[in-house]
Amino acid sequence: MDHVQEYWQIRKAAVRGKNGLIATQHYRASEVGAEILRRGGNAVDAAVAAGLMLGTVEPWMSGIGGGGYMTVYRAKEERVQIVEFGMRAPFAADPDDYPIVGEETGTDTFNWPRVEGDANVHGPLSTAVPGYLKGVSLALETFGTMEWSDVIAPAVVSAEEGVPIDWYSTHMITGAARGLRLYDQTRETYLHDGLPPTLGIDGTRGRLKLGKLADTFRVIQKEGQRALYGGEVGERLAADMETAGSRIRHDDFVEYEARLGEPATTQYRGSSVYCAGHLTAGPTLMRSLNDLAERWAASGEVPDINAYSSYADTLLAAYEYRLKNLGEGSQTSRPTNTTHLCVSDRFGNVVSLTQTIMSGFGSRIMSPSTGILVNNGMMWFDPRPGGPNSVLGGRHPLCNMCPTIAKRSDGAILALGACGGRHIFPAVFQLLSFLLDYEMDVDKAVHQARLDVSGTDVVTLMSSMDEIFKTALADRYPGSRIRPNGVSPMFFGLPQVIQQHPGGEGVGGCFIPSPHARVVAA
């Protein structure tokens, strides 16, 4: 075997609540969101507060240097809307900055042809214009009920305290250390004495200050998103990026716009499914659900070999089409480390939010004057010129985010999504099948074995799958592999799910092996 075996299994029981729920990848963010709900805030208020918090406690996953998509179900209007705030290429982006030198990269870098110096993967030329603050501000203004200064307040305190250092945060920093040491500010911040931070000798946790991020958060608390998109924070960040060698300039921030939109929608087995469209994995999810409905019908109470084979065949076909045809320049599409959260409130509103800085620690470029860790969103573009997803100044890239809401025929509202790059869409696709085809409860669905197809012909089977199924699938898909649903490395998407019943009770579940992921009831 070419990987370390893990001989343990963890279950996180689903959580129930009647006054709202929140599921995130970090318990501190979940607690912040639940407290917002208890104070009378709605699901969007809680999602924005928790999302901002995530950027201060797991900065390698997301933050104000990144972007995302939010899918919002408004119970009173029985309407779903999308807030789009994905990263965008700088206006001055130049395809010649990414000369192709040969072989394909791995799936973590999307199997594109390799670029000289991995310039699209890390460093200043990998940086795209962040949209995060513009997007969550638009969501709060449009759908929220609380003031910006109050919603961001917990994240301000957290930024001042610094990242809690425990075994998992140490593990994340250690795993990225070879890349972090290449750039001055990330090296100074995360490897201050040349080594990753560790727990105290007595087991007590320390804190890691993220440069000048706390000062930046205080300014943003007072001035709102204008501080970055046209204000002093944006000027300083743009100057730092230019000095580092990025194509980002101040005009990129001034001209950036988040957008409200309508969801991509389809019917599946009598249920309505709503996704962020345009350049997310949403259109691919819709296409795949329609394909699955034509090729297979569920039987029994849990997936059988026919179900898993149908999942694999559908995903293989979906990625072949997606990577050849979709992108902002195509006629078929409208204009990894990531994190996801789901929220429901006492009013029946539901939110599914995915946010990211792309790879772990993004571009690894941290702005010295602001403490903002900037994404490496240029890696989303195909470096080969002339395609629908090729590098072009001002273009938005094709991304993997897939925040989804579904309305079942019985009136239950589902919010689900995941993090994990190309693993996201396969996870959401199968979870929808578990919840809609088999009407599994949330607890059973999040623990059900899955498979993964992520853009190659390799089919990865979760090691907890029935032995008979693993043997049969391995025979059917040569080159398939069996992997654990473990903490590290991660071979499958990391989901959150909330199911809001018409009577008011909600049930939430989250990624199982994660030490920090938690569902909290308001």
Image (spheres, rainbow, N blue to C red):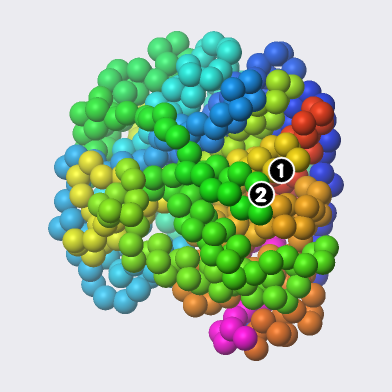
Q: Is residue 484 magenta?
A: yes
In the picture of the structure, the residue carrying the numbered disc 1 is 409
**Could you tell me which residue is drawn at 31 percent across and 23 percent down?**
229
Judging depth in this view, the residue of 91 and 398 nearest the camera is: 398
Quadrant of the drawing holding the C terminus: top right
Mark 1: amino acid: Ser
Q: Nearer the viewer, residue 138 or 115?
A: 138
What's the magenta bit mostly, secondary-structure-wise? loop
Q: Residue at x 24, y 27 (%)?
A: 255
Q: Which image quadrant is residue 434 in? A: bottom right
Structural crowding at the residue carrying mark 1, measured as other residues with C-alpha within 10 Å and reported as few (<14), some (14–19) or many (≥20) = few
Horizontally, residue 234 falls left or right of residue 199, namely left
Question: Does residue 282 appear left or right of residue 225 in this picture?
Answer: right
Q: Is residue 509 magenta?
A: no
Q: Are marks 2 and 1 in contact (CB under 8 Å)?
A: yes
Image quarter of residue 521: top right
The range drawn in magenta is 476-489
Say what secondary structure mark 2 lies in.
Answer: loop
Q: Residue 270, labelled with which disc?
A: 2
Task: Please give the name of the residue rendered at 36% of the width and 36% of the height, measured from the top-left corner.
Answer: 130
Q: Is residue 114 above or below residue 427?
A: below
Query: Along the horizontal axis of the image, is 313 left or right of 364?
Result: right
